[in-house]
Image: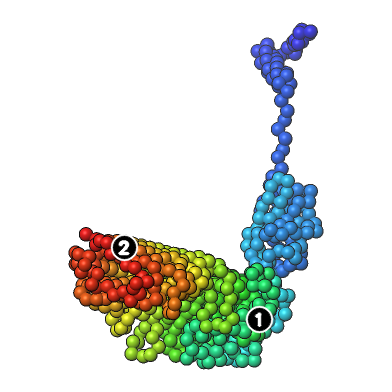
């Protein structure tokens, strides 16, 4: 049937015909639109629920196990979920504008985000602090609260004190300040002591505050009767840096082996201590800062230690970090007179930091020792010492409890500078000493300056020293040596593309076995004194393959010196010293080369430039070979 077949519309009595026509047309148009929509199957748009918004909490600080209410809009009627950081909370009530939950026991102490999640979306409250807030005036009151171990404490923007003569122990409590410019922790005199206990399995953090203390220690044990830092400093003033390390760590190393069971697996489950965004200052007359085990003759802290964006000021004081775990120092500036940083079973990593060794210690002498027995990594870091010496490495010289872990070591893009401020005394400071027991050592793109010697030894694996600049010696020092040793266990050593400058009577000394290569280096001597290249075959029962090529030597008195350890020869020496320029006067024997007794094998001295000499016969007269006929020398030609 046609849609409008029986539709009849007439004007009402008295209604004008034009008005009737308009009304009828409107009705027809509305009906037509309705029919068209129905024919297209159109449906009304459903209402989309809104995501939660306008969140607020009834408190910004709460410890684990505490009930917290969060309010807002659009929570919906179906119970959603609430997360505290990465931990899921138990929701105890839920409505469209409010929800109540309990801080879970596995929530991480510190600042966290509270996230409320519904089917429509999620919203968060940032900077909610899981822990307690302490606004008292002294830390003894905080210790007296006996908070549960592992509690994080939010300090106010104020000063907190340790009273004169008082020792305050905080038992596995983390300290969070309101910024180093706002939160201050101070000890009142030289007899006051702040001590943080960090027990195994706990992670303790100190952050966003400033501390000025006389003695600040971190240990898994309680404080002993006497301050060990004061006694140890006085007892060790006459000891060498290596001996000081050995005395400090001997008992602690033995205890580590007993407690850890095996040195092959690093102890990573013994908790940790972290400092970040903090200023630490040792007050005048203070003993220093120490992170170690005070219960065992200054033994090892059992866990990992991390310092990030830390400023330590302690001119004239001591700073010790001795750990069985990893030690990481990043983006920090650390100043002290006596420093020992040693990881006995882990890795020591120092990134983008500045280490300053001052001269104002108890004896006026500064020194630093940095060791990572599993591995050592120093990247884009500056070391600077005044009246100090510096020792870095992957094993502990001077300790009777020598541990060998065979890891790797790298020093990349860093600067090392040590000076001796008084050349008339007998301490002979201003040396750089690198001691490795590593499978591989790489030193690259770095700068080394010392008033005396640069010494590096790796007893185990390969050594690569590439693209560095060395400046060794001083006008008031008679002699300076660059000594690179592969030790006695068969290390391979290579020095390539370095610049070495001596400011004293200088010598480059290569001591090793197996493979030793010295190529494409520029070596500048001082006042036509010293020996350009001195090679020592350290073990008569091991072979040595020596390659010295493409180098430039100037400012020396003698060119080549070769010798051996001692006694009878059982393995051969093979030497290739070719393509080098010895740009200094070579006038009498043995200025070209001296070969000591006991070497057996071959030595190629061809194609070098020996001063201004132009004929082979003349150069041959300037060579002394004490190993002939066992060592055969080839001198076929000279460099044009």
Q: Quadrant of residue 100?
A: bottom right
State the quadrant of the C terminus.
Answer: bottom left
State the quadrant of the N terminus.
Answer: top right
Q: Position of residue 17 (x, y in %)?
A: 68, 11
464 vs 198, left or right, is: left
Give me the C-alpha separation between circle 2 and circle 1.
Answer: 53 Å
Residue located at (33% from left, 90% from top): 424
Q: Position of residue 386 (x, y in %)?
A: 39, 81
* Marked residue nearer the N-terminal end (2 or 1): 1
> Relative to residue 594, is residue 498 depicted above or below?
above
137 vs 471, left or right, is: right
Q: Position of residue 204 (x, y in %)?
A: 64, 72
Circle 2 is placed at which residue position? Answer: 578
Q: Quadrant of residue 358?
A: bottom left
Residue located at (55% from left, 82% from top): 399
In the rendered structure, find residue 9 and report the number of the disc placed on it. none
Residue located at (22% from left, 76% from top): 588
Q: How many marks?
A: 2
Q: Secondary structure at mark 2?
A: strand
Circle 1 is placed at which residue position? Answer: 255
> From this viewpoint, which residue is outermost toward the front?
629
Colour treatment of the image: rainbow
Q: Is residue 1 visible?
A: yes
591 vs 160, left or right, is: left
């Amino acid at each position: 049937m046609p849609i409008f077949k029986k539709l009849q519309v007439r004007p009402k009595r008295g209604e004008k015909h034009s008005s009737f026509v308009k009304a009828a047309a409107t009705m027809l148009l509305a009906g037509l639109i309705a029919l068209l929509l129905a024919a297209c199957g159109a449906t009304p748009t459903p209402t989309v629920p809104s995501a939660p918004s306008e969140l607020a909490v009834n408190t910004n600080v709460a410890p684990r196990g505490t009930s917290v209410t969060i309010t807002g809009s659009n929570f919906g009627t179906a119970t959603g979920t609430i997360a505290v950081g990465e931990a899921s909370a138990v929701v105890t009530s839920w409505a469209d504008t409010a929800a109540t939950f309990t801080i879970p026991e596995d929530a991480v102490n510190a600042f966290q985000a509270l996230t409320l999640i519904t089917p429509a979306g999620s919203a968060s409250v940032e900077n909610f602090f899981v822990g307690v807030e302490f606004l008292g005036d002294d830390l003894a009151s905080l210790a007296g609260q006996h908070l549960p171990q592992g509690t994080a404490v939010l300090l106010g923007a104020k000063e907190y004190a340790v009273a004169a003569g008082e020792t305050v122990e905080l038992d596995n409590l983390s300290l969070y300040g309101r910024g180093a410019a706002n939160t201050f922790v101070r000890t009142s005199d030289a007899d006051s002591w702040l001590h943080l206990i960090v027990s195994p399995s706990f992670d303790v953090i100190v952050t966003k505050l400033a501390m000025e203390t006389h003695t600040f220690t971190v240990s898994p044990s309680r404080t002993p009767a006497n301050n060990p830092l004061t006694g140890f400093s006085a007892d060790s003033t006459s000891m060498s840096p290596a001996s000081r390390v050995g005395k400090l760590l001997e008992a602690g190393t033995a205890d580590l082996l007993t407690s850890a069971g095996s040195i092959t697996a690093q102890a990573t489950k013994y908790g940790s201590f972290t400092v970040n965004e903090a200023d630490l200052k040792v007050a005048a007359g203070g003993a220093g800062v120490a992170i170690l085990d005070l219960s065992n003759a200054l033994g090892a802290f059992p866990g990992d230690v991390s310092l990030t964006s830390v400023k330590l000021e302690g001119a004239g004081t001591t700073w010790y970090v001795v750990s069985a775990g990893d030690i990481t120092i990043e983006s920090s500036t650390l100043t002290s007179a006596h420093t020992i940083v040693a990881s006995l079973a882990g890795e020591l990593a120092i990134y983008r930091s500045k280490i300053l060794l001052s001269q104002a210690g108890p004896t006026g002498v500064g020194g630093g020792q940095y060791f990572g027995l599993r591995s050592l990594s120093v990247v884009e870091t500056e070391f600077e010492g005044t009246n100090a010496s510096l020792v870095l490495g992957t094993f502990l010289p001077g300790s009777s409890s020598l541990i060998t872990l065979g890891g790797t070591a790298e020093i990349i893009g860093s600067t090392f500078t040590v000076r001796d401020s008084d050349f008339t005394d007998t301490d002979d400071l201003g040396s750089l000493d690198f001691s490795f027991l590593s499978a591989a050592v790489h030193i690259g793109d770095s700068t080394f300056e010392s008033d005396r010697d640069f010494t590096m030894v790796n007893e185990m694996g390969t050594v690569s020293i590439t693209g560095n600049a060395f400046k060794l010696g001083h006008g008031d020092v008679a002699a300076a040596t660059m000594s690179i040793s592969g030790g006695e266990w068969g290390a391979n050593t290579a020095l390539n593309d370095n610049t070495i400058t001596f400011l004293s009577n200088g010598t480059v000394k290569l001591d090793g076995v197996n493979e030793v290569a010295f190529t494409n280096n520029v070596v500048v001597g001082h006042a036509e004194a010293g020996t350009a290249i001195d090679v020592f075959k350290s073990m008569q029962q091991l072979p040595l393959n020596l390659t010295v090529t493409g180098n430039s030597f100037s400012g020396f008195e003698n060119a080549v010196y070769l010798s051996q350890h001692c006694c009878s020869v059982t393995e051969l020496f093979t030497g290739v010293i070719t393509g080098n320029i010895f740009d200094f006067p070579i006038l009498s024997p043995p200025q070209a080369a001296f070969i000591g007794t006991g070497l057996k094998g071959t030595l190629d001295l061809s194609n070098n430039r020996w001063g201004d000499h132009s004929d082979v016969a003349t150069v041959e007269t300037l060579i002394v070979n004490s190993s002939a006929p066992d060592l055969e020398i080839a001198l076929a030609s000279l460099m044009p």
